[in-house]
Amino acid sequence: MGGPGVTATAAFVERLRAIVGPAGLLTDPADTAPYLADWRGRYRGEAEAVVRPASTAEVAAVVAACAQAGVAVVPQGGNTGLCGGSVPVGGLRQIVLSLSRMNRIRELDAANNTLTVEAGCVLQSIQEAARDADRLFPLSLGAEGSCQIGGNLSTNAGGEAVLRYGNARDLVLGLEVVLPDGRVWEGLRGLRKDNTGYDLKQLFIGAEGTLGVVTAAVLKLFPRPTATATAFLGVSDPATAVALLSVLRSAVGDRLTGFELMSRLCLELVLRHVPDTADPLREAHPWYVLVELSDSGDSADLAERLMDALAPAMERGQVRDAVLAQSEAQGESLWRLRDSMAEAQKAEGISIKHDVSVPVSRMARFIDEASRALERAFPGVRIVAFGHIGDGNVHYNVSFADPAQNAALIEDSEPVNRVVYEVVAALSGSISAEHGLGQLKREEIRRYKTPLELELMRAIKRALDPQNLMNPGKVI
Ligand code: FAD
Ligand code: ZN
């Protein structure tokens, strides 16, 4: 018998109950089920309990009890991750440690432009707290109504404002972390300058819960823009979109906040499946770019600035057609075309998804070469490509239009992945731009990191988590 004795489990669960109280412990399968499956419904695991501590001290006591009993810990935030990182893998004694009750904003320091928050704060509530203080917390993504800042930091989330403000990693000044042995690292400093050796917080950011449990963070706030200008452009190909990115950056600098690409097929899927959407341009174009500027000052001035910046490109024919949002509502409806991509794709059926990045200068080459190689290997294949082209990040999803043909493709996605990832590797890109590795790409990454990189990653893991109890079976 490989599993734990019934009494060992029962005694352990009682120990956890003594730490977190009845409100912090779930064992009834009806209660634990949502914590044991991932957002896509692709991964499901088992756990001895779902533990929901309400304070850092409780997290520390729970983790220490697990370390003593040899039980693994799977940290979980909003459970919106797309790589299966937040649910248990099979064959081990483990608990899910949900941070959702740790959702207090601890401190706003307006003069320092920082907000100290607990890991279980939902991203949207942090954006709102910043807005209430007339500040901006710029991290913004489709799952913001349910993902938590602890999850955002642990996956180094990207999203739609990276071009200007960077990834989650760039938005953090300090962290509080419960280490795998239950000790608490108190690194909640609000310093923009601190050159006192290794930057320890960066180890935990993007670690997907494999090095410790993030319990709180000091986040950077920014001035809240008062003006936005949004435009939807028709272009002939991704190379033109990349050229346009350079033109706009030179013309408007840091005001360029968003620069998103989508193909005609993407727009068609949205128009077909998402109610109350309409093609903003008169004619069809092969590719589209959604551009957003933001600034202090007045929206009308900013709109004029955007039109001035685009005018030469329109004369040259780089921009085939353009619509500029005339109101906030119109700007939102343009963004809705982009933000509905996931929903529209889901309605169309299953596809093989890739979240990849290459240097922006090679973005057009990636799309071109990957698409040709796939077309050669799988004639008639359908590619849904869209994403944060300003960051060199594209969501590159592969399927057939015909569901019957699709089932076989999905069943055997390995050859498709190989084609895509080999092009990514040849262009010095990354096989996971913003979603992480989790369980999904745990094996895949061994092909694409160098032996030295893997050795260093394993050395860090061993140094912090010698018992391998922190989110085992993920990342490495
Ligand atoms: P979870 O899914 O709960 O966990 C993710 C990983 O972090 C797991 O490995 C988990 O163990 C670990 N973890 C969670 N909390 C902690 C903690 N406190 N301490 C240590 N480890 C922890 N991602 C992007 O980057 N950009 C996007 O634009 C984007 N859009 C999305 C749109 C939709 C509709 C959906 C469903 C997802 C999207 N995602 C996107 C993916 C996902 O939302 C992000 O990865 C998000 O950061 C995950 O946060 P979470 O709280 O749900 O984390
Ligand atoms: Zn994305």
Image (spheres, rainbow, N blue to C red):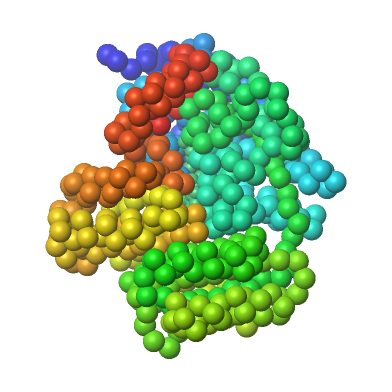
Quarter of the image where the N terminus is located: top left
Residue 375 appears anywhere in the view:
yes
Query: Which residue is pictured at 74% across the width and 38% down the height?
Result: 192
Q: Is residue 343 visible?
A: no
* Vertical position of residue 291 compared to residue 24: above or below: below
458 on left or right of 105: left
Q: Position of residue 141 (x, y in %)?
A: 54, 55
Q: Is residue 246 above or below residue 267?
A: above
Q: Nearer the viewer, residue 116 or 194?
A: 194
- Relative height, residue 148 to residue 324 (above, below): above
The residue sitting at the bottom extreme is 282
Residue 131 image offset from top left, x and y in percent? 74, 58
- Furthest-right residue in view? 111
* 126 or 168, nearer to the observer: 168
**Residue 190's x, y, as percent?**
76, 36
Whole-percent x and y of residue 116? 73, 39
User: Where, quadrant-wise, is the C terminus in this rendering?
Assistant: top left
What residue lies at 40% left-to-right and 62% top-to-bottom? 386
- Along the viewing direction, whichever of 470 and 205 lies nearer the viewer: 205
| Residue closer to the observer: 185 or 273 | 185
Q: Residue at x 62, y 69 (%)?
A: 251
Query: Which picture quadrant has residue 376?
Result: bottom left
Residue at 59 percent across and 49 percent down: it is: 166
